[in-house]
Image (tube, grey):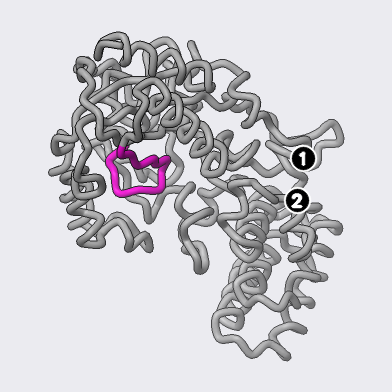
């Protein structure tokens, strides 16, 4: 099999394994490495300190430091379902919102198996082992840069890779290969034009003009990577997002025109997703949380972070409604063992209003010992007085 036939055979096998997109590039330094370095220097990575690790930075600059034998990088893309917009059920109960990529199985578990199968196919064709490394959002690679250079699409103003006639609802994966393959032509066109819908729609204004974002303000970061409290000044803007955010993709004309509800079957929405009942979610015990989100990306936020997000969503969805059921749920969470949950429950009760909520806060204040929770209770009661 000559090199051209092998390359086309690899792409064909990739499609058989569920990858809709496949391209080849070389391991040269990524074209936008300087932008990434400036982003790091500005501290816009938040708590994701691993991004600034010197070893990881050098690997991003030179993929051969990951795999010295690397001659080619195979970049793959696989679609997941485009999201809808329903936030309430027939009864009018507020629903939480979960980013579409997290509706089904965890891609960190699904994609490596398929990449391994693709490598095994290559080795069978060649009749010998091939040095390789497989990654999907887990290794020190600038994935979107590599994908653009492999001809898959362009990096949009919302920082997502956009594929013509498909949109941006897909996962990226990479296989570093000790195998010489002809690189595909890079995708050079910028098809965002003068559009700025994503920038204008972002509630926290985290998207920056250089096609990066300030992670510290991004709803996806705040609901997944942020381990402590969500900053007070950003809680309102989180809305009812409880894991990730799709707003900048939902408003993109390329998605509105080309994205499709269906994706790979592995990422089909579970029955209790994509729009969980907020009040039911708030009652998840540690065991129930583990059971519900087994093999789901949502486990990344852990129970404390997930309930923190749910509580913020309740505070936003029921603001000034003095809702009895929501108040009862939050009363219970005021005594949760995790201080992170208690402090956000105090904030949300202040948002709901009502004399019962005020009394619950006063009662908890008398027995609370954690400084952060006490501060949140005082702030909630203070806001109450102003109302």
Task: Compare residues 170 and 339 and report the one nearer the observer.
Answer: 170
The part of the image, by quadrant, that contains residue 210 is top left
Q: How far apart, in angstroms, are the residues tagged by discs 2 and 1?
A: 9 Å
Identify which residue is drawn at 37% across, 22% down.
Answer: 162
Q: Are marks 2 and 1 in contact (CB under 8 Å)?
A: yes
Q: Residues within 10 Å of mark 2 (few under 14, many from 20)?
A: some
The residue mark sitting in front, 2 or 1, is 2
The relative height of residue 107 versus residue 250 in the rendered view (above or below) is below
Image mark count = 2
Q: Which mark is residue 244?
A: none
Task: Compare residues 251 and 296 and report the one nearer the observer.
Answer: 296
Magenta stretch, residue numbers: 131-143
The relative height of residue 266 versus residue 317 in the rendered view (above or below) is above
Predominant SS along the magenta part: loop
Q: Is residue 26 left or right of residue 326?
A: left
**Image quadrant occupied by the N terminus:** top left
Q: Is residue 262 left or right of residue 210?
A: right
Residue 129, horizontal then vertical, whole percent: 35, 35
Identify which residue is drawn at 51% across, 54% down.
Answer: 224
Identify which residue is drawn at 47% across, 61% down.
Answer: 226
Taking the view exactly as shown, the residue that stands out farthest to the front is: 127
Q: Is residue 137 left or right of residue 31?
A: right
Residue 309, horizontal then vertical, whole percent: 61, 56
Task: Mark 2 or mark 1: name the one nearer the start of the chain.
Answer: 1
**Image quadrant occupied by the C terminus:** bottom right
Residue 67, horizontal then vertical, whole percent: 25, 45
Confirm whether the magenta stretch covers residue 34: no
Q: Is residue 81 left or right of residue 186?
A: right
Q: Which mark is residue 292?
A: 2
The residue labelled by disc 1 is 272
């Amino acid at each position: 099999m000559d090199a051209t036939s092998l390359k086309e055979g690899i792409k064909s096998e990739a499609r058989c394994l569920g990858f809709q997109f496949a391209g080849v590039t070389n391991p040269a330094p990524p074209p936008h490495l300087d932008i990434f370095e400036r982003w790091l220097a500005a501290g816009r990575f938040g708590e994701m300190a691993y991004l600034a690790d010197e070893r990881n930075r050098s690997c991003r600059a030179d993929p051969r430091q990951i795999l010295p034998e690397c001659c080619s990088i195979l970049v793959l893309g696989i679609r997941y379902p485009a999201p809808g917009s329903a936030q309430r059920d027939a009864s009018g109960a507020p629903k939480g919102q979960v980013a579409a990529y997290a509706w089904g199985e965890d891609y960190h578990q699904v994609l490596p198996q398929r990449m391994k199968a693709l490598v095994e196919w290559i080795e069978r064709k060649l009749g010998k082992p091939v040095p390789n490394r497989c990654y999907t959002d887990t290794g020190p690679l600038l994935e979107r840069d590599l994908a653009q250079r492999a001809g898959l699409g362009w990096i949009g103003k919302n920082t997502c890779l956009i594929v013509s006639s498909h949109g941006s609802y897909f996962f990226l994966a990479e296989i570093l290969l000790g195998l010489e393959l002809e690189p595909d032509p890079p995708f050079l066109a910028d098809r965002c034009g003068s559009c700025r819908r994503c920038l204008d729609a972002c509630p926290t204004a985290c998207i920056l003009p250089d096609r990066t974002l300030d992670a510290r303000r991004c709803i996806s970061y705040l609901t997944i990577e942020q381990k402590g409290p969500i900053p007070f000044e950003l809680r309102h803007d989180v809305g009812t997002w409880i894991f990730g955010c799709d707003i900048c993709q939902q408003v993109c004309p390329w998605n509105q025109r080309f994205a499709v509800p269906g994706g790979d079957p592995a990422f089909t929405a579970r029955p209790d997703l994509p729009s969980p009942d907020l009040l039911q979610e708030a009652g998840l015990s540690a065991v129930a949380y583990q059971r519900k989100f087994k093999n789901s990306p949502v486990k990344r936020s852990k129970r404390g972070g997930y309930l923190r997000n749910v509580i913020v969503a309740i505070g936003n969805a029921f603001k000034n409604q003095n809702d009895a059921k929501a108040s009862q749920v939050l009363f219970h969470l005021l005594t949760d063992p995790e201080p992170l949950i208690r402090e956000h429950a105090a904030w949300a009760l202040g948002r709901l209003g009502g004399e019962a909520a005020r009394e619950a806060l006063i009662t908890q204040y008398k027995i609370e010992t954690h400084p952060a929770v006490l501060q949140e209770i005082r702030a909630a009661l203070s806001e109450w007085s102003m109302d």
